[in-house]
Every structure is written in C-alpha cells, then in structure tokens.
Amino acid sequence: MVPRYALSPMKALWSEQAKYERWLRVELAALEAQAALGQAPREAFEQATARAHVDLERIAEIEAEIKHDVLAFVRSLEQMVGEQGRWLHLGLTASDVVDSANALAMQEAFSLLLDALRGLMALVKQRAFEHKHTPMVGRTHGVHAEPITFGLKLLNWYAQLERDALRLSQAQEAVAVGKLSGSVGTYANVDPEVERRACRALGLTPAKVSNQILQRDRHAQALSALAILGTTIERIAVEIRHLSRTEVAELSERGAHRSSSMPHKKNPISAETLSGLARVLRSNLQAELESVALWHERDISNSSVERIVLPDSFTLAHYVLVRAKGMLEALQPDVERMQRNLGLTHGLIASQAVLLALVKKGMSRAQAHERIRDLSLQVSAQRPFKALLLEDTLILSHLSAAELETLFSLDYALKHVDDLFQRFTQKRGNPAL
Amino acid sequence: MVPRYALSPMKALWSEQAKYERWLRVELAALEAQAALGQAPREAFEQATARAHVDLERIAEIEAEIKHDVLAFVRSLEQMVGEQGRWLHLGLTASDVVDSANALAMQEAFSLLLDALRGLMALVKQRAFEHKHTPMVGRTHGVHAEPITFGLKLLNWYAQLERDALRLSQAQEAVAVGKLSGSVGTYANVDPEVERRACRALGLTPAKVSNQILQRDRHAQALSALAILGTTIERIAVEIRHLSRTEVAELSERGAHRSSSMPHKKNPISAETLSGLARVLRSNLQAELESVALWHERDISNSSVERIVLPDSFTLAHYVLVRAKGMLEALQPDVERMQRNLGLTHGLIASQAVLLALVKKGMSRAQAHERIRDLSLQVSAQRPFKALLLEDTLILSHLSAAELETLFSLDYALKHVDDLFQRFTQKRGNPAL
Amino acid sequence: MVPRYALSPMKALWSEQAKYERWLRVELAALEAQAALGQAPREAFEQATARAHVDLERIAEIEAEIKHDVLAFVRSLEQMVGEQGRWLHLGLTASDVVDSANALAMQEAFSLLLDALRGLMALVKQRAFEHKHTPMVGRTHGVHAEPITFGLKLLNWYAQLERDALRLSQAQEAVAVGKLSGSVGTYANVDPEVERRACRALGLTPAKVSNQILQRDRHAQALSALAILGTTIERIAVEIRHLSRTEVAELSERGAHRSSSMPHKKNPISAETLSGLARVLRSNLQAELESVALWHERDISNSSVERIVLPDSFTLAHYVLVRAKGMLEALQPDVERMQRNLGLTHGLIASQAVLLALVKKGMSRAQAHERIRDLSLQVSAQRPFKALLLEDTLILSHLSAAELETLFSLDYALKHVDDLFQRFTQKRGNPAL
Amino acid sequence: MVPRYALSPMKALWSEQAKYERWLRVELAALEAQAALGQAPREAFEQATARAHVDLERIAEIEAEIKHDVLAFVRSLEQMVGEQGRWLHLGLTASDVVDSANALAMQEAFSLLLDALRGLMALVKQRAFEHKHTPMVGRTHGVHAEPITFGLKLLNWYAQLERDALRLSQAQEAVAVGKLSGSVGTYANVDPEVERRACRALGLTPAKVSNQILQRDRHAQALSALAILGTTIERIAVEIRHLSRTEVAELSERGAHRSSSMPHKKNPISAETLSGLARVLRSNLQAELESVALWHERDISNSSVERIVLPDSFTLAHYVLVRAKGMLEALQPDVERMQRNLGLTHGLIASQAVLLALVKKGMSRAQAHERIRDLSLQVSAQRPFKALLLEDTLILSHLSAAELETLFSLDYALKHVDDLFQRFTQKRGNPAL
C-alpha cells in the first residue's frame, strides 16, 4: 500500500493490527464452537476471551525466531492465556485462520466499497438529472456526431456503475465463505460442526468443500470485479480529461491543480491519477489469476501475491471511488461553451437527420448520401449547412423549408431524452441493468 | 482463431457467414418493428425477408471499394431487395447492428459453453462419487500431508466448476442486451419502440442506456468469466500433470501421446496443452479490459481487439472444455499406486493426529511438537513412525497402543468424507456454492 | 491470425507451407552435417535433398493417424526418400526441429519488421525535418502549455522508434539460436559438431546449453520488444486521434474513413485501429511470460501458447508498422490551424517566460507567481495577456515593453529547435539514443 | 512496498528521504551548471550547497497546503537558502527534476540488482561445476526421459541468468538518461548546455529529445527486464519445488520451513514464495506498458502507476535475487536419491539410444519403434528393459550384448557433458550467450 493512495477507513482494515484481530476472532469462534460441542473445556474459551489480545511486538519477536506468522501469533496467545491456551487452534491449520480471516476482511472491504460506490452513484445520478436537458455535442471517433445532453452522458456512467455494483455484490458473495476443515480439507482433526458454528458466528458461509485453503477462483473473481470497477472510473476520468482540454473547455475542476512552472494552467490531475490507478487494478488481477492453479491440496505461492495485491487492490479501489466522487463534486460544466461547441460544424451534425428524411421521402440512399457529402464540403461559417440546403433545388424538391428547420432543431434530436431518463426513475429489478 | 483449437459447433458460430446472418437478423428485426409501427412500409419488410440473403462474395467486392464492412453489407442487401431496400438500416448506425449481433453470438456461445461445462461437471461429479472412498495422500507444498480420497479431489474441482457455471451465467446475462439507439444513443432517428420490439424478437433486453455502442464493461465481464474458467481447467490440468509424473504415477491418460524419440514414454499432452491455453484466455481478458474506457460516445479501438479476442476466447474456452472432458474420460487412476504412495512416509502423515491427541490429553503443544519432530527424524522403512511411538514412554504415558492404532487408521482420517459428499446430493439453491 | 491483419510477406512466413519448409531445411542441414562427419551416408543426404519436399496433404493424413505433427512430417519425408530416409531426423528430438525452425522464422520476421520500421522511421524523420519550424502549441495534461513545433513532436516519435529498432535488434539476437542437442540437451545421440555445422549453415548460433528446447526467456524478450513497439505506435496513434478531433483539427487523414450514417464525418479510423492492436501485442506478451517457467527439461504447455501468440504478434506488429506508415503518409497537418490554436489562450502560453524573467530581475518567485496568476484570470480575447502586462506597473517596474515583446515571440520560445534537430544529423553511435 | 519484501540496501534507495536527496542533487547540478555558464550568480549555488538540505517535515507541511510535491520541495529549499534561493529550479519544470532523479534511482537500483545477480550467478556456476558429473534423470512432460547431470540443469539456469544480466544492462542503459529541457522539451527557459553539464555531473546522458518528460518506453523496457528476470527465478523455483516433492526427494532446503500442524513436514516455502513474486513482477510490467502512450507533451497518468510499480518492482526483484541465493545456498541435493530415481523405469530411459542404434544398423525406424514399444510394455522390476532386449532375437540380430551394454551406460548418455561445460570456461564475448 502506497500511503498516498490508502484512505480511512479502508486503510485501517488492512493494517497489521486489524489483521491479527480478525485472526483472533476466528480462533475464538472456533474455540467457542468446540466448547459448545463439548470438544474443549468451556473454561478454555472463557479464559481465552478474557486474556487473549493482539500484541504486535510479541508476535514479531516470536516470528523472528520461528519464521511462521500464524504459529507465532498462536503462541503469543497461548502465553497470554496460560495452561488452557493449548486448546486454542486445536485441530486447525494455519490457513483455516488466514483464509477465514481474509474472508472477513474482504466482506468489510466490499461493504466499504459498495457504500462508496452508492455515494458516487447517487451523485452521478443527481447530476445526470440536473443536466438532463443540457445540450452538448455527441462525439464519435473524437469527431462531432449529433447532439446529446450532458445528462445523458452522466446517465450512461451511472448505468455502468450500477453494473459495477452488481459485480461487486456477486464477488462479495463469492468470497463470503470460511473454512475450518484442517490440513487437507477432510476435517480429520476438527468437527465439521465446528466450522458450521464458527462460520455462522463470523457471518460467513462454510465452503461446501475445501482443501487446505479456500479455492482462489473466488479471489480472482473479487479482483476481477475491482479491475472492471477501476476501468469504469477510468472511462469517466478519460472523458473528463477530454472535455477539459483547452480547445473543448466544456468541463473544469473547481480548484484544479495548477502548474508549478506555468501559472495560468488548470490541469485535470485527479482524472489523470485515476486513469493511472485503473491500470494497477487491472494488472493486480493478472497476478491473482495466475495464483488459482495451485498444486495439490495447496501450495503457498498465492500468499506472497496476495500479501501485495489484496490490500493494494481494495485500498486502491476505495481511493479511486472516493477521489472520483470528489472530482465529480468539483466538476463544473460550462453550459454555454457546450452550446457554442455544438455549432462548431455549422450545422453538419444534422446531416444524418437530413439524409434519412430524404430517403424516407423516396430519394435513394446513395443519391442522398452523395448530395449531402458534396454540400458538406462547402460548409463554412459564412455558409452554414442549413443555408446550403435551402438553396439546393434537389433537396427542396423533397423537403420543405419548415421540414428542414425541424431537422436542425435540438428538439428533434433530443425528443426521446425524457423517455430515457424515465427508465431510471421506475422501480424495477435489475433484469436489464 | 487457430483451426486446431476451434471445434464445431462453436467454430461455425464465429464464421463470416454466421456473422452476416446475425447482422441480417438484426436488420430484419428492426425493419419488422418499423413496419409494425407504421414507420416503414409493410411491403419493404416482406420484400426484404423474401429477397435478402448473405452473399459473401458480393459483400467483399463492395467492401473492397468502400472500405466499410457494415455499409458494404447493407448495400449488398439493398441491391437484392430493390427499390424498397432503402428502408433497410434506416435510422440505424453500424454499431446498432454489430453490437446487437455480437450479443446474439455471445448468447449462443455462452449456451454452448454452459452445455459443455455441464457435461464436464456431470462427468467430474460421477467420477468423484465413484472414488469417494479411494484413499490417496493429500499433499501441501508438494509434500505428503494427510490422507484424502481421490473423490474429494474431484469434488473440489466440481465445486469450482459449479462456481464457473454461475459466473458464466452472470456474464451471459450481462451481455444479453441489444441496442438500436442510433449514432449517439439518443434515438434521434429511430423510435425507442423499434428497439424494444426488435430486441424482444431477438431474445435480447434493450440496454437501458447506450451511446453509439453497448458499453464494454459487459464484454470485459464476459472475458473475465472465460479467463477464470480457463484457469479452473488449468488447475485440473496441472494436478493431472503432477499425478502423472513417473515418480507419482497415480494417474495416466488412456492412449496418451507417445514420444517420437523415446518409445517408452506416455506424456500428459492434453493437460499441458490446457495449461497453455489458460494463459491465452487470461491475456485476452487484459486486452478487453483496456478497451472499456473508450472516448466520448465511442471510438473504434475496441473493434480490432474484439475481432481477435472475442472469437478466440470463446472458441478456446469451448475447446478447453471439450478437451478437458476427453482428458478426464481417458483418465485412469491407479488405485493401488495411490495406496502405496500413502505409505511412502512410513506413517508420518499421522503426525498431526498424534500431536493433537497428545495436546488433548494434556501435554503442552510445544512439548508434543518437539517430541514428534524428534521421532520423525528417526523414521525409516525399517522403523516406521507408529513403531517409534509405541516404544516411546513419554508418548505412551498419554496414549494407549489402541488409541495410537486408531490415529493411524484411514477410518480416522476420512471419517467425515461421507458428510462432505452429502452436501452435493441435497438439492439446495446456491447460497454456499 | 486474423486475415484482415496479416499482410504479405509476413503472412506467408507463418503459413503452414513455410513452416514445413523450414523444418525441412533443419532436417537437411542436420543430415548434411552428419554426412560430412561420416555419421550418415552421403547418399542419404543426396537422396533426401533430391526427393524430400513438403506435401501438406500427406502430412495431414499421417498426423490424423498418429497425432504428432513432427513425427508425421518426418514420416512423410521418409516415404519420399525411400530406404535411405531412415537417416533423416536420426538422433534428433522433435523440438530440435521445431525450435530451430522457429528461430529461422523469427530471424526472417525480425528482418521484415526492421525493414518496415526503418521505412517508417525514414518517413517520420523526413516529415519532422519538413516541419522543423512549423509552430504549434505544446500541451500538457491536455491543456495548452508553451509553443513547440510540429517537427519536434515528430522528432520525439522518431527517437522512440530508434529505441524500438535497438530493442528489436537485441531481441533478434536473443532468438538467433538453434539447438540440435537431443531429447534432454545432452547430445546423447547426436554429435555437438552436427549442431555446430547445421546451425552455421542455417545462419544461427548454437545455444551454449539447452535442454529439450531452447529456453523461453528468449521468446519472452522477443514478444516484449514487439509489445513495446506496438505501444510506441499506439503513442503516435493516440496523438493523431487527439489532434484530429473537431475542436483541434490540426491533423487529418487524407481519404479518411467516412461514416455510414453521418455523411459529413472524417474519422481517424487507422489511428483507432492501431490503438487497439497495441493492446493485443501487450497481452500476448503476458501469455509468453507465463510460458518461461517450464517443468524440468521441458513441458509442452508453451506450445499451444506459441501456436497462437508467435504468428499473431509478428503479423500484428508488421501490420501495425505498415498501417502506421500509410497513416503518416496520408497525414495532413493544417499549419494555419496550428497557428490559430497557438493564440487560443490570448498569450497565456508565455506566462512562464514572464515569470522567470521577473524572478531573474529580482522579484521573488512567490510574488511573481501570484501577480501573473491574478492577471491570467482577467485575460480574454479583448484583453490579451500581453496587454494586461503592459498596463501593470509592478510588472513594468521590472521588465520593459521591449523585453516583454521578446518573451512573447515564437523566436524566444523556439530558439533551440535547430540545436535539437542538429543532434539527429550528426553521425554518432547510439550512446544517447 | 510490502516491508516483508524490501531489503537493504534497495529499500533505502526508494525511501522518501533518498528520493528528496536525489531531487536536491538534480537541483544543485542544474544550478551549478547555470552558475558556471554565468546564467545564475555563483553565490546562489554556493549558498544553496551550504544551506539546502532535505527536511521531510517541512516539505510535508508545505505540500499539505499547496498540493504539489515538487513545488513544496523547492519552496522548502528556498526558505533555507534565503534570498538567493530564487535561483533554484529556475527554468526547470517539475519533471526535469523528477525524471532525472528517477533515472539516478534506477541507475543505482540496476547496479544493486546486477551485483546481486552476479552473486547468484557465481553460486549457480560453482554448484553447476561441483555437480558436473552428478547423474540424475532428465524429465520431459514430467516423465523420465534420459539421463542428464544435476550440473547440467544448473548450467542451464546459469546461462539464462547470463542473458538476464545482459537484459538488465541493456535496460539500465535505456534509462540512464536525464532531461532538463523545460515544460515542453524546447529549452525555452533553460539553456541546453545546462542539461549537458548537469547530466554529466550526475552520470547521466542527456536525452536526445524529450518533451515535458522522458519517454516511457524506456521505463517499460526496464520493467520488462525485471519481469523476465523474475520469471527466470520462477523457473528455478518451480524446478526446486518439483524436485523437493516427497516422491522425488532429490532436493531439500536445509532448515526448510516446517508446518505448524504437521510436525514432520519440510516445505519448499522459499521456492513457492519466489514463484508468487514473479507473477507480481509480470503484472507490474503490464501497468507500465499501458503508461507509455501519454497524451501530447505529457499527461500525468503514469505518475500514480510509477509511484507504485517502480519501487515495488525494483525492491521485489532485489528480494527475489537475494532470497533465491539463500535458497540455493541451503539447497541440498540427495545424490544417492538421484541415482536411485534414475533406475525407476528399469532401463527404459535407454530406449531411444537402442532405437537409434537399431536404425543405424539398418532396421527401419517403424519396425524398431514398434518392437521397442512392445518390449517396453513388459518391463518391470523383475524384468528390466535390458534383460528383455537380451532375450529378443530380432534385437540381437542387430546389436551384440556388448553394444547393448554400452547403450545402457551413463558414460554413453553423458559423454558430451564435459564439452558442454567447456563452453562456460572459455573466455568469449557474448555472441552465443
């Protein structure tokens, strides 16, 4: 974790302290279940609950000696609890603790992400509705195409974020599992009932089957959801960068970063930073995907990977959501400039509307296409497209001046915008997302 | 698509012919909807239905001239239909056709994959139950750990495949959308009702909002599901490669490939091939993830990527499933060798069971651990672990010979196997997967 | 290989026919060496040379039967040669042939790429010198910064292409190795002298050590060079897309693709296509990187990967170079528009020059920065930056009107351009690249 | 950076303190050059040298206020230096400092890596020569093939590490460049001679051309070299894991990690950890490759990526080399077990030698292949391959018992081993690597 990109409360979640506290929760949940089942003394559980706590320094000392983090942790607890401490971790393997505790971390982490995402979604939706009827030019290939509204652009982002929310939820569910099935998943030395009870207490579902560990397709799905989420934010960020450029100037960030050397500049730094972090989220996924095909009942090659990419990807995804929200809050659309840019092609953005009207009136598509293209080459500020059409007898033999006027109106181009927004006000399930 | 790795019927699905036929379906569905709504002559739809067909040669000729595949396709249809042909594609943009048709292709492709996956799952499950009680050694870090059964290993694969089936279904749903919303998604020149009707006829849901195209987070989710699926198969393949090695010899493939230069060899070629193809599925995902953040209302940089990775990933995923099934059908477990390998450590695989029993009897974990480790260093074929324990007075002061005997029995190690399999016979939803 | 993206002569290089011809070259080179060393009859070599040829159909028939492509190929040759055919492939393992032949393919492929790259470089350099003094605005963060020249932008591309040429050469050298060392690299059944002679005849260096195969770090380096090359072209393509957008309009592509639905549009399709293909080149690298850590003296998991990514990456890299050259040939800079865009900020692009001049004259940086920022907020078309400065007594107390005039001149901003270009005219080695 | 995987002295190199010290070196080198050229007062340089130092706390305070790390740093220096401080950073842009300083960091980092790599290489070479004649079985597809020696396996690793050393050197050279060319690379406000002198003083080559930054193909090449290096170590690690498995047991790690739950186990944890870290090195490359195609004269999306992947990849690569060396030092080959494993196939590993001898004696390859395969199916401990051959009249009609004896001898299989090692004792350049 780069401190710069780890924010509260996500950052705390991945601290050493929090990790060991989760380990302790798992150990105690297992011991409580064993005590309840008569497989360990009730007293052991009570003493452990009363006395065991996380002592980072002590753990570090023991680990330096025995080179095994879970064993060091358990030994530190045993020392605190005393003689009854030997009932701790009994029948468990290190991964029972680590994997179940990681599941707890990821549950919390996904909940934080979903909260942040919902906050972002609410903001995007609100701004979308605010700008439902703010016209701007739609661009394909970077080139002016036809009118849209700024609200529509935001609504499209919103819909993608909605899909991200679904993917996050699906991924959260995929990793909401614990396992206390022992060294090779056979429960040879721990009762399956212990797993059931402990998982219930921890808010996890027991894995239907496991080996020494939980299978890593689950974690790969989690990081895949984060990678796609990052990419959605990248899409928003790239768009903001485009619309902030000097020549377009339709958006700017209130209080945007200024240059050290060039005092006049306002730079879309947030959007650029988010573009970069999306790449890291994508590449972290790759490392986890390679960590699924472990050998036999487990090898530990996933561990070094996950020490890096799990905390990094969750904290980066969180940072990305928080920063994206800040960026969108500070985003200032220049409505007048949007209007002005709509006119930059002197009416050519109506060319398709005219083409189709001609075809509907009976002109062949090829003839209509050719004539419009020819006229389009003569268009200039002095001779806008509409004026040229109104002088063209072939055109006028199919379309009246009034009809042409209509085809150039924003009302024509945007007549279905309300219908589109309507879809996001009705309550429905998510069949269509 | 490498011909070697493209199998029927998936291969045909991605042929040029099939692609254009899907395009035609979309065009006709749109025209039918327009005719039904009185926005195009009924006659135009009827003539188009009667006369339009896919003529690869004609399309190629026109494309060579005008350098636009969709336009060339539409023009070829217009020429077949005659004067009424001008109503085809009216108000649509090329991506309306391409993206909706791609959705049709992916729907079919996912269905083929799910069929193949279910066939593979049935086989794995059947073999798992066959070998429910076939003991073998469980290995962690490549080293003998404790007994499992071969069935359990298969069951674990089955459970992961089950999760893949869920991921595929979720992804299939994510891409089951069409769009006929025009150049920038505003329906400026096509009625939203046309989209609704055409999509219904095509078996797709209309996207709630789109711009020139469908958003690519959907496609990224699709390729992510395929990448994880490939990785699951890789996990199975890697395991088979391990268990097929000369020293282990617990598995072999009936009719396995033989070496050209070394006539005695049987090589797990299928498993190695599958290991390789998983890498390609993973890397294709990366290219699509980079194709989500398109500019404005679309840029076409995703197109060259998807011409390659969409057909390749779906055909490879299909190949991988088919070949994995063949591999598993031909897989011959050597039950006797599994039994023999269980004994290779002369009883040491019971060490944890003994350790825990000692702790439960009141020995401190540290003392028990140390004594067992000391004894383990003396183990040999002549002096198996159990014999050493039976000679050790410290051990015997805690455990009787009969108790020790029990701890070394497979019945002890595998006592919960039936419980585990039970979970896969009950009908339940998929809360736990 | 997608036919659309495979061009002559690179395409032919990766055909089945060409592949088998390379295999035949390796077989004959080995046999010739054996004959020369008296380890095979001279007659065998002569008959093989006279009679053996590539018969695709025959090979396919045999392969269908014995499921081994190299064995099928060798058997087809044996049948052609007759009784002496048994001396073919003697002592070799399949990978001796495949890997050495692949090295031949890659040598040719790299040479084709280097030719294409040099052609592209010559064009870029020529256009750079043409536009050495064509002023345009330099942009950072998408925002106007300070003047550059269009030639400088091109020169920067040129320098990166120069580095790509070096990386390609280094990679070509890394894979310019053959191996005829037998099943496990020990020359148990083939004389090292045969390898030496055959490799020399084939224009390859014998690997200093090998096992069954050549080690894949070599191939990973090759694909890494191609991935970076693709990324360089992506950088050029992204820039062209930016400068082609409606609002910027400094570049356009002669004969650019037009829209099917919007007759007025000119879209930078080539540049977008190249952006996409760079992603595929990057992701193919990933698959090969995962294919380096093969098991023991080889496993064959690299083979399925390389059947896909080797031909694909080389043909795509070639396509990308050819198409980039075409794109740059058709590229039309609008010099007048560049000039006009330089003025869009009404002189603010000189702000740093003024700031530094003030500091040199003794003003504190903080004070200078603040005053300039304040003035910059008042700038408009009516009140350009220079005019505001000329009215500001604080500024004028440090800088004369003449000095200010100088700071706003392009001559000031671009005074070192000739020096920069000079560096590319001197002959020097490549210490600085 | 995960503290666990960051070792001295590489770790210190990437600390905040060290970063700012490099920034200071660049600032002072620039000022010294300006002073020498009469473009700044000598006194300014002297006072800056005397008074400026890194004050982390002060920088953090200023950055919290102005949100710009370089500006904050420069301001902290100005405050220390006093009135003459305004000559610091004059004419420079932030990236002049950051990129040149990063080049310094990477130069040091590559040197540390090359030192560590050479240490590892020396160890591998030494152990290779020690075990030059230690026979073991060669395996392909995980299956016994023909004899090799353990030394040969090590020698092959050595040769790959040699190639890594070359790649690291090439990459080090690619990033050994500085730039002090100002906001858009035109030297508008800084003399090119300042860049030349400052770079010389810093031990860097000035970039022939730059824009606001150094181009990122250089950094991508650097991370590519690290990714391949990691993959080489992964190859070694995977091999050690294979040879350490219970059934093979040819290698073990002295003092290997023991299991918490299973006291008898020795696990190749180092090798597994290294396998994992290679994946992270590979994926980091992907993020940098995506950061090459920056917009115009720079966007800053590379910055967030590089804050993560540059320190991480260099520290991980260093860790990987150090840990690999430790692993290899502790590696204990079980020479006797290697010998024993050679016999596991009861002589079948000589099958190719016999096959070829038969063909040379005039038998057709097909007949020889078939007979050997038939016999191989009858081989058992009781009936080893050689015995079967000595009973087979067809075989004996071509080969004498003495000839057969030879074909089964290790001397036959390993007769060229000395020749192979010889290649690594001669001094030669690196044409063949």
Image: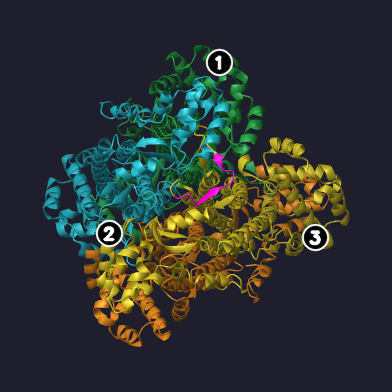
Chain colours: A yellow, B orange, C cyan, D green
What residue is pinned by disc 2?
A377
Chain identity of mark 3:
A
Q: Is label 1 in a helix, a strand or a loop?
A: helix
Q: Is residue B140 at all visible to an observer of this figure? A: yes
In which quadrant of the rendered image does the N terminus of chain B lie? bottom left
Chain identity of mark 2:
A
Picture quadrant of residue B81: bottom left
- Nearer to me, A346 or B123: A346
Residue A33: image tag:
3
Image vertical order of residue D345 relative to residue C111, above or below: below
What residue is pinned by disc 1?
D49
Which contiguous range is marked in magenta?
Answer: A248-257
Chain identity of mark 1:
D
Left or right: where A234 falls relative to A69: left
Which mark lies nearer to you, 1 or 3?
A: 1
Q: Is residue D249 at all visible to an observer of this figure? A: no
2 or 3: tag closer to the N-terminus:
3
In the rendered structure, are the residues bearing label 1 and label 2 in contact, judged by CB atoms less than 8 Å apart? no
Left or right: where C311 falls relative to A183: left
Picture quadrant of residue D373: bottom left
The amino acid type, in three-letter code, at marker 2 is Leu
The amino acid type, in three-letter code, at marker 1 is Thr
Query: Callout 3: few (<14), some (14-19), or many (20+) C-alpha neighbours within 10 Å?
Result: many
Are labels 1 and 2 assigned to the same chain? no
Query: Callout 1: few (<14), some (14-19), or many (20+) C-alpha neighbours within 10 Å?
Result: some
Residue B408 screen position, x and y as percent? 69, 57
- Nearer to me, D2 or B56: B56
- Nearer to me, A63 or C382: C382
